[in-house]
Image (cartoon, rainbow, N blue to C red):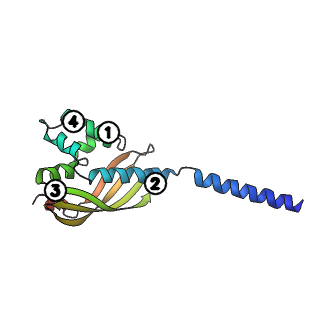
Amino acid sequence: MKNLAIKLFMLTALVTLVAGCSTPNESDEYVETIQTFLKNEFTGPDDELKAAFKQDGAFPPELKEYVDENYKPLVMDWEDMFNKNHILFYQRMAYEKGYQLKPTNIEMIKDQDLAYDYEVKVEYEKNGESNTTTVSGRMNLNDDGEIVTIRNMDDGGLLEKLSQ
């Protein structure tokens, strides 16, 4: 009887451990959303985005398609984010000045429910010469895991450096 109780306890503990490890953690999903957004924002511009930027108009269909594909699943209101220069702002500047961007490290700290502070080391390269700066800020997500706001952004002088 004692052996049976021990075996049942061990089996219950094992099942609990496996179930706990296999259950997706919503916090991990939020971190993944923010990482994907930051990678999208600070990688490139790639050939597809360059082609979209070459089109006439402030927001040509090719650019809308790019935003729909890369940002719409991540943010609650992509139009608002675009109008506030939270989407493709650095990519457009890099394109216009001949730079390539690449995030080399992304760190996030959960501060409160659905609020994360982030820090991205961004490498910017032009004509074989590269430098790195750190961009930091805070993102808030909604219950659906979509980015709602980006606040307290400090670009570490990236905009100024891309303007040169």
Q: Depth check: 47 or 86 in front?
A: 47
Query: Residue at the location (11% across, 54% down)?
Result: 97
Residue density around tag 1, few if under 14, some if 14–19, many if 20 or more, within 10 Å: few
Q: Earlier in the sequence, mark 2 or mark 4?
A: 4
Residue density around tag 2, few if under 14, some if 14–19, many if 20 or more, within 10 Å: few
Query: Residue at the location (21% across, 45% down)?
Result: 47
Q: Earlier in the sequence, mark 3 or mark 1?
A: 1
Q: Earlier in the sequence, mark 4 or mark 3?
A: 4
In this orientation, does residue 71 appear? no
Q: Position of residue 101 (x, y in %)?
A: 23, 57
Q: Position of residue 163 (x, y in %)?
A: 11, 58
In the rendered structure, which amino acid carries the disc numbered 3?
Answer: Tyr
* Secondary structure of the residue carrying numbered label 3: loop
Residue at the front extreme? 128
In the rendered structure, which amino acid carries the disc numbered 4?
Answer: Glu
> Pointer 1: what residue?
69
Where is the N terminus found, in terms of image quarters?
bottom right
Report the Cα–Cα distance between label 4 and label 3: 21 Å
> Pointer 4: what residue?
62
Residue density around tag 4, few if under 14, some if 14–19, many if 20 or more, within 10 Å: some
Label at residue 99 = 3
Q: Depth check: 44 or 134 in front?
A: 44
Label at residue 113 = 2
Q: Earlier in the sequence, mark 3 or mark 2?
A: 3
In the rendered structure, which amino acid carries the disc numbered 2?
Answer: Asp
Mark 2 vs mark 4: in front: 4
Q: Earlier in the sequence, mark 4 or mark 1?
A: 4
Where is the C terminus found, in terms of image quarters?
bottom left
Report the Cα–Cα distance between label 3 and label 2: 36 Å
* Secondary structure of the residue carrying numbered label 4: helix
